[in-house]
Image (cartoon, coloured by chain):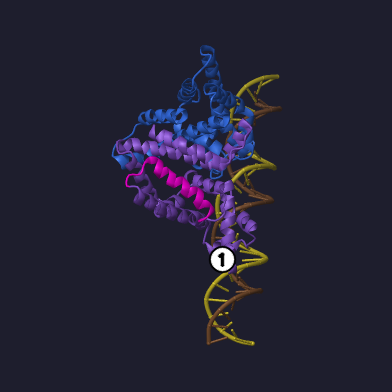
Chain colours: A blue, B purple, C brown, D yellow
Amino acid sequence: MSQADTVTRILDSAEELFAEKGFAETSLRMITTRAKVNLAAVNYHFGSKKDLIQAVFARFLSPFCSKLDKELTVMAAANPEPSLHDVLDVLARTMLTGVHSTVGTRKLSVFMRLLGLAYTQAQGHLRRFLKENYQQTYSRFILYLRAAHPELSPREIFWRIHFAIGACVFTMSSIEVLRDMSMADTGEDSGVEDVMNQLIPFLAAALER
Amino acid sequence: MSQADTVTRILDSAEELFAEKGFAETSLRMITTRAKVNLAAVNYHFGSKKDLIQAVFARFLSPFCSKLDKELTVMAAANPEPSLHDVLDVLARTMLTGVHSTVGTRKLSVFMRLLGLAYTQAQGHLRRFLKENYQQTYSRFILYLRAAHPELSPREIFWRIHFAIGACVFTMSSIEVLRDMSMADTGEDSGVEDVMNQLIPFLAAALER
DNA sequence: TCTCGTTTTAAACGGGCGTTTTAAACAATC
DNA sequence: GATTGTTTAAAACGCCCGTTTAAAACGAGA
């Protein structure tokens, strides 16, 4: 039991610190200090820093992709020709429920920050790891999007969806700073739900236009 | 003259490596080796690594913001009530032409990666530096965007603009990963300019809807 | 209670980092 | 050609990094 505790505490601390600072700027000593475990515990339980990074991603991406896969299957069974809205709805629901139940009580902003890191700081080993393990779910998701808009070229679909991902990741991962800025700028507070309620029509307009 | 050569070669190498790897992952030894100058040259000519990072940004942001300011003035003189499209057009043209003439023959992708880094990897000193030196041009640009849609509340404007910034920043900072993915996904290569040409109507549609 | 595999601990290792130092090379002025 | 200020060069500094080692502590089964 104390082993699981150590492993979990390392993963929790690493996750927080990676999301906050990135990989290179986070040392194993920072992680083990925050986790209140011995420095050598990381290499003992995970092997290396690279393996720890992969483990952090695996812990939240594996249940997330399982859930998404399942939900996509449910959607496809109930609906032979799902619209773009249907597909995005499955994604949004999986993210919101997945983050709070399957993946634990982790903050949505941390989840988003990690997703962002996967794009902006993933080099070599991590990119290979993600591709090997989650490419299949990703491809399936993209396929439904394509099917929903067969008149658009694959390239157009690809870039539109990634522009949208960018808006989400950027907004949600810096939601606290942005809410402060908004407060200072407009004098009104924006709740997270308010922001979501503006983000979704924004994305819909941009994707479908 | 050999001094200017040394300084320029350091800036060139640092720019390339920062864009490729980020700040923390790029050492002064990598930079000076590529630039074929002595290791101590960085500290002699720039003072510290932090100062070098700022110098790299200053070299491309200063002429870029000057150009953008000038173009905004031209636009405002010719057009008392510029539309959102007009304003975005000025930005896009400044980026595309500015990169190739004013700023030199530098690659557009490097320019974009650096812009992305400014958001995703800027901590402390760099954020302060950018705010101090380029906040004014940024604010002016945002003001034109607001003026183009006076019927929208400040809060709506604020969030739409930052959703758009998110799409830009995310795309820019992971442009190489995304191009690889696009290539694997669709079998077609997407040039950086192609991506820009899709990004701008995407943003326009999302902002205006 | 002793044993043996697992986990934790403290200490050290080699290496790369940013930076500093000291001296040599250079260029311009008189 | 000597002098002076600037630039380059090589070497070293102390620091923090990821990783390894070797012993201690622990825990379950005989």
Which image quadrant: the N terminus of chain A? top right
In the image, residue B89 lies in the stretch drawn in magenta: yes
Please, which chain is the residue tagged with disc 1 on?
A: B
Which image quadrant: the C terminus of chain A? top left
Residue A117, position as x, y percentages in the image: 53, 38
Q: Residue at x 51, y 18 (%)?
A: A82
Q: Is residue B208 above or below residue A82?
A: below
Residue type (three-letter) at the residue carrying disc 1: Ala
Q: Nearer the viewer, residue B48 or D8?
A: D8
User: Is residue B45 among the parts visible in the rendering?
Assistant: yes
Q: Looking at the image, which residue sits at the far top?
A: A78
Q: Nearer the viewer, residue A19 or C21?
A: A19
Q: In the image, which residues are magenta?
A: B80-102
Q: Nearer the viewer, residue A68 or B27?
A: A68
Residue under label 1? B4
Q: Residue at x 57, y 27 (%)?
A: A138
In the picture, residue A77 is in which quadrant?
top right
